[in-house]
Image (spheres, grey):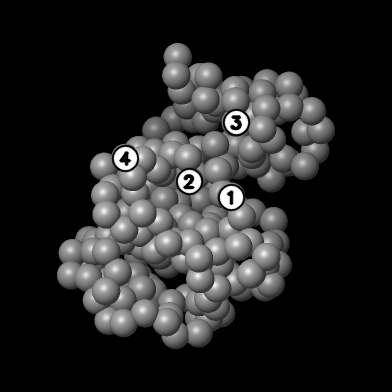
Amino acid sequence: MVKTLDFIQQVFKGKSIYRILFNWQVEKHCHSLAGEVLDLAAGAGASYQRYLPKGLKVTKTDFYAGHKPDKVIDFNQPLPFEDETIENAFLFNAVNLARESKELFSEIHRILRPSGRFFMSSLFLANEVAEPHDYLRYGYDGLMKDLKTAGFSSIKIVRIGERFTAAAYLLHPCWLFNFIRLVVYSLALIFDKLIPKKLRKKSPCPIGYFLTIIK
């Protein structure tokens, strides 16, 4: 019931189906997170922030000063933090903005403390997002390979969405009214569940990925 009400609320706030599913992944995987977190692409009032535990100290960083982050950084440059000083890090829906994602992963590995945790999400099927540039789309194997190359050993990847929710997401601008979105997204979630497990396993088609990584 609580999840249904939250779903309806997010739809009527204009959230895309991907954003809703992503927020639920944040809630699921970060519910026990404590201490301090460095958010490397916090944006301006991102909706996932309300799904984080109360009392969590989040240092918000962003490329744009207009988003009013705690610290303005360009993660296409070396990160301005000392080695092994960061307890936890977020990189949500922004790795496509990195010119050299392998270097960014290596920088995150460098600044994390031993056993530090890194939470990340990556879009797979999406429109071009020029903020200020859009460089790449990762698949499951590409994420795993480059994160291992950066030195991470414990990597768990969850696929977000499937064929019908992916289609609903790509057509998000076409659903002009929230009540239409409510119907379309509800049906997409139902139809995703009807896709045979063998097909989902053999030929997955997610909107994106949510990753839980430990240094």
Nearest the viewer among 54 and 153 is: 54
Q: How far is disc 1 from disc 2 in space, using C-alphas?
A: 8 Å
- The residue beneath circle 2 is 49
- The residue beneath circle 4 is 31
Tag 1 secondary structure: loop
In the rendered image, the quadrant that contains the C terminus is bottom left
Q: What crowding class fits label 3: few (fewer than 14 Cα within 10 Å), some (14-19), or many (20 or more)? A: some
Q: Is residue 189 left or right of residue 132?
A: left
Task: Give the residue type at disc 1.
Answer: Gly
Determine which quarter of the picture holds residue 163: top right
Q: How far is disc 1 from disc 3 in space, using C-alphas?
A: 14 Å
What numbered label is drawn on residue 45?
Answer: 1
**x, y percent for residue 95:** 51, 66
In the rendered image, the quadrant that contains the N terminus is top left
Seen in the picture, residue 2 relative to 164 is either above or below; the reply is above
What numbered label is drawn on residue 10?
Answer: 3
Q: Is residue 175 left or right of residue 33?
A: right
Seen in the picture, residue 41 relative to 212 is either above or below; the reply is below
Task: Give the residue type at disc 3.
Answer: Gln
Determine which quarter of the picture holds residue 80: bottom left
Query: Which numbered disc flags the more N-terminal residue, 4 or 2?
Result: 4
Residue contact at pointers 3 and 4, CB within 8 angstroms: no
Residue contact at pointers 1 and 4, CB within 8 angstroms: no
Q: What crowding class fits label 1: few (fewer than 14 Cα within 10 Å), some (14-19), or many (20 or more)? A: few
Q: Nearer the viewer, mark 1 or mark 3?
A: 1
**x, y percent for residue 132:** 69, 72
Q: How far is disc 2 from disc 3 in space, using C-alphas?
A: 13 Å
Query: Which numbered disc flags the more N-terminal residue, 3 or 4?
Result: 3
Q: What crowding class fits label 2: few (fewer than 14 Cα within 10 Å), some (14-19), or many (20 or more)? A: some
